[in-house]
Image (tube, rainbow, N blue to C red):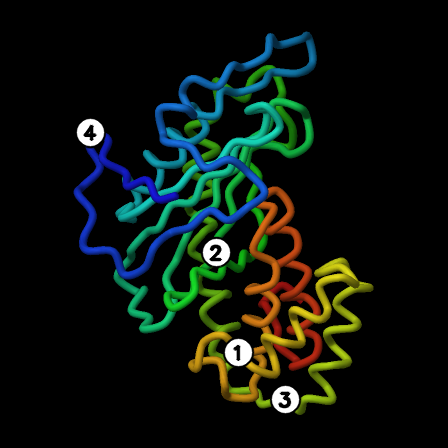
Amino acid sequence: MINQVLEPGVPPAQPKRCNLLLHCGAQAVPRSRIAEAQTPPSTRTWQPVPHITVLNAVEVALLERGLRITNSAYALSKKSARFFGLLEITREANDNSDYHWVVGVRNSHDKTVPAGIVAGTQVLVCSNLAFAGEIKLARKHTRFILRDLGELAHRAVKELDHGFNEQARRIEHYKETTIRSSTAHDMIVRAVDAGVCSNQQIPHVLKEWRKPSHGCFSPRNVWSLQNAFTETLKGNLTLLPQRTQRLHTLLDKQVGFSNGRN
């Protein structure tokens, strides 16, 4: 399901470089459904925020920072209590031939996750998603979150630059690092212990590593191994950011990549 952003104030998209996909695990919906999702009443200590309010705040912050939204997709799950949106964006420094930047926007009405955004990438050839660290718009849905949401969104978008730059360095490092199949097999097993994937997913990851669905992942490097995982992890959008962040931690340690925060 693909939904292109055409709201007032958002420039028309350029020709799509790749379909922005929401995979199974949530119901893909048009933007109008996000606005229709019911927000539960607040309490003395908890202030749920409408999904569309969070989305609007992030969009405005992106546009005011000069980041143009070119494509989008949205999903609801758990009877609309959980929202996840993907915004494809362009920036001057993003001149990549095989992947592009996406911003994941998430919110919940069941206290499972705070409102937040994640910097991510999507591989053009296969729509695989991988997310860097999450930036929360607030520690929790407190009573003043609606008042402060605009400023919080601007701060979070400012932090995206770090996330995008870190991810670009990581990908180049992965591409330059060759890996033996024996080491890859060991890391696939360790990925289960790290909470990246389940035991049942090991055969699929191995298949993608040994015989990639896309020829561009035939080089025996860490970039190809990452995409063997992300091809398998297409699914629950609620879990995907956490799983790919754990995957980065595992692969970074293996190849000696520093994210600048160690």
Q: CA distance from mark 2 to mark 4?
A: 25 Å
Asked whether the residues under the numbered discs 2 and 3 touch, taking CB atoms below 8 Å apart as contact, a structural biologist would say no
Q: Is residue 94 above or below residue 73?
A: below
Q: CA distance from mark 4 to mark 1?
A: 41 Å
Q: Mark 2: few, some, or many residues within 10 Å (few <14, many ≥20)?
A: many
Left or right: 20, with 84 as reference point:
left
Q: Which residue is mark 1?
A: 212
Q: CA distance from mark 3 to mark 4?
A: 48 Å
- Name the residue: 61% across, 58% down: 233
Q: Earlier in the sequence, mark 4 or mark 1?
A: 4
Q: Residue furthest right?
A: 193
Q: Which residue is mark 2?
A: 120
Q: Earlier in the sequence, mark 1 or mark 2?
A: 2
Residue type at mark 1: give it: Pro
Marks 2 and 3: which is nearer the front? 3
Residue type at mark 4: give it: Pro
